[in-house]
Amino acid sequence: MSSTRPVCVVSGLDVTWPDGGSALRELDLTLKRGRAGLVGLNGSGKSTLLRVLAGEMIPTAGHVSVTGEVGYLPQDLTADPTRPVADFLGIAATLEALRAIETGSTDQSHFDRVGDDWDVEERATAELDRLGLPARTLHRCLGELSGGEVTRLALAAVLLRRPDVLLLDEPTNNLDRAARARVHDLVATWPHTLLVVSHDRELLERVDRIADLREGVVRWYGGGWSAYVAQVAAEQEAAQQAVVTARAEVRRQRRDVVDAEQALARRRRVAAKAERTTGLGKAARDYLKGRAERSAASYRHVHADRLDTARTGLDRAEELLRDDTAIRVDLPGTEVRRGALVLSSRDLVLRTGTTVDTDLVGPERLALVGPNGCGKTTLLHTWAGLLAPRAGEVRVHVPVALLPQRLDVLDDAAPLAAEVARRNPGATPEQVRARLARFGFRGAAGDRLVGSLSGGERLRATLTALLLADPAPRLLLLDEPTNNLDLASYDALVTALAGYRGALVVASHDQAFLDDLGLEHTLDLGAPLVGGSTP
C-alpha cells in the first residue's frame, strides 16, 4: 500500500549524451512508497532514469532527491568469471574478518570491519535461498554459474544492502520459470518502495500502479498490467473518436471559409453595381468601399480564426494517439518448403553434457525450454556453427542466423545503416533504408551509432541485419529475444515472426511469449532424455 509521502522527487531532469543527443529532457517524477512499474518504448529513457535515481549517472541538469538507502539492479551485468561470489555480494572482507575473530583474533580492525554485521553469512544464505540458490553458491566463482544464476546473485547482493528504495531493470531477464516465480513473489511482497522496469506481464500484475514514460512525460495508472492495458485502451478509443470529431470540424471550417469567400465575392459584385447606378460622389464611394473592405477583413479573420482553432484541436487530439513503432517482416526469400530437412543432430553431446538427437523439418517452429544451465544457449550456438560439440554430428542444410542473448553482433562504433549494408553488399542504399524503416528505424534513425541504441533498439537493429543478410536465413535461432523489448515492441515482434517463412527455434523462459508465437513443438533440455525427431 503506498503512502502519500514522496520518496523520490525528480524535477526538470535533463540527460544529454556526449554526441549531443537527448536521453531525457525536462522530466518530472514523484515516486511514493509502494510498488510501481515503469513502462515505455525502447529508447524512451527508462533505464537512464533508473541509473540517475540510483546515483549511477549524473544528469546534465535538474534536481533529484531520493530518501533512504537505494538498491539498484541494472539490466546488463558484467561479471568477471574468476570473481568469487562472496566478493560479488560485497561481503568477502566481512566474512574474512569474522573467520579471523572466530580463530581468536583480537585485532580491532577485524571488529571494525564486522561492525554490527555478525549475521552476514546467515543473511546471505537466506537471500540466496529466497532466490532459489543453494548455500554452497557462496563459496563458488561467477564463472561456475549460468547467466540466470548470476542475475539472481546480483539481486541477492542488492537485497543484502537492506534498501529502502529498490530499483530493478528487467529483473526476470534470463531467468527460468521457477526463478521468475521467486522474483514475482519478491515484487508482490516488497514492503518498501520499488520501481521496476519490465516487459514481464506477470510481474507487472503484481505492482500497485504503473508509470508510462512517453515523449519525456510520466503518466501514472492505478493497478497492475491488466488495469493499465484497459485504461490505455479506453483512452485510445476516446482519443480516436476525438480525432474523428476534430477532423470533421476542420473540414466544416474549411467549407465555411470557402462559403465566406463566395459570399464576399457576391457582395462585391452587388456593391459595384450599386456604385455605378447611384451616382454617389467620390468621397462617399471611397467611404463605402473602405467600410466594405474592413467588414470583409473582419469576416475573413473570424473564419480564419475558427479554422486555426479547429486545426489546433486536431493537433491536440492526434497527440493523444499512440504511434508505437511497428516491426513488419515480409521475406519470401526465407521460405522453406514443407518436408525439406532443415537440420539434423545425431548423437550430439553438448559441452554441458546434454545429449540431443533431433531433426528439424520444413518451416517448423520449435520452443526450446529448460531450466537455467541446461544448455539452451549452448545448443543454439552449436546449431549455428559457433561452438563445436563434445561429440556427435550436426548438419544444417539451409542458411542459418542466430540472434544471441548478448546482442554483440554489430559494431558499436558504426552507423546502423552501414552495419546492415555490410551484411548484404548487394543491397542498394535505398533497399537498406527501406528495410530499416520496416523495423522502425526511419529517416535519420538509420544514421545512429549502434552503441547509442537502447537494448530493445539494438535487438531490432540486430534482427534487421540478420534478416537482410545475403543469403537470407531460412533457419532463425532466437535466444531470449524478449529480454530487452518494450511491451509495444514485444507485440510487434510476435506479429513480425508470424510473417517469417523459414524454420524458427526460440529459446525463452517467457511462457506467454512462446504461447503468443503459437510454436508447434517443444524441445525440453531439462527432460531426462532429449532425443528423437520433433513430431
Image (cartoon, rainbow, N blue to C red):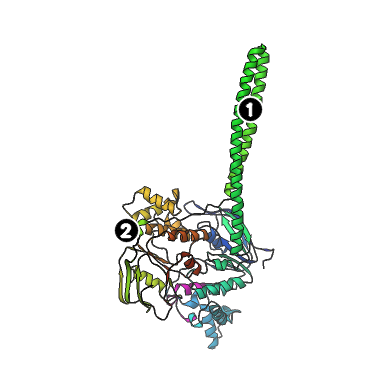
- Residue 297's tag is 1
Q: Name the residue type under label 1.
A: Ala
Relative placement, left or right, of 115 versus 384 is right
From mark 1 to mark 2, how far is it between C-alphas?
A: 66 Å
Residue 231 placement (x, y as % from top left): 62, 58
Residue 21 placement (x, y as % from top left): 49, 52
Above/below status of 37 relative to 23: below
Count of numbered circles in the view: 2
State the residue in front, 308 or 22.
308
* Mark 2 residue crowding within 10 angstroms, few (<14) / some (14–19) / many (20+): some
Relative placement, left or right, of 72 versus 353 is right
Q: Which residue is mark 2?
A: 471
Q: Quadrant of the N terminus?
A: bottom right
Question: Is 305 within the magenta?
Answer: no
* Quarter of the rendering containing residue 210: bottom right
Q: Name the residue type under label 2.
A: Pro
Q: Which residues are magenta?
A: 138-154
Does the image show residue 392?
Answer: yes
Above/below status of 11 relative to 90: above
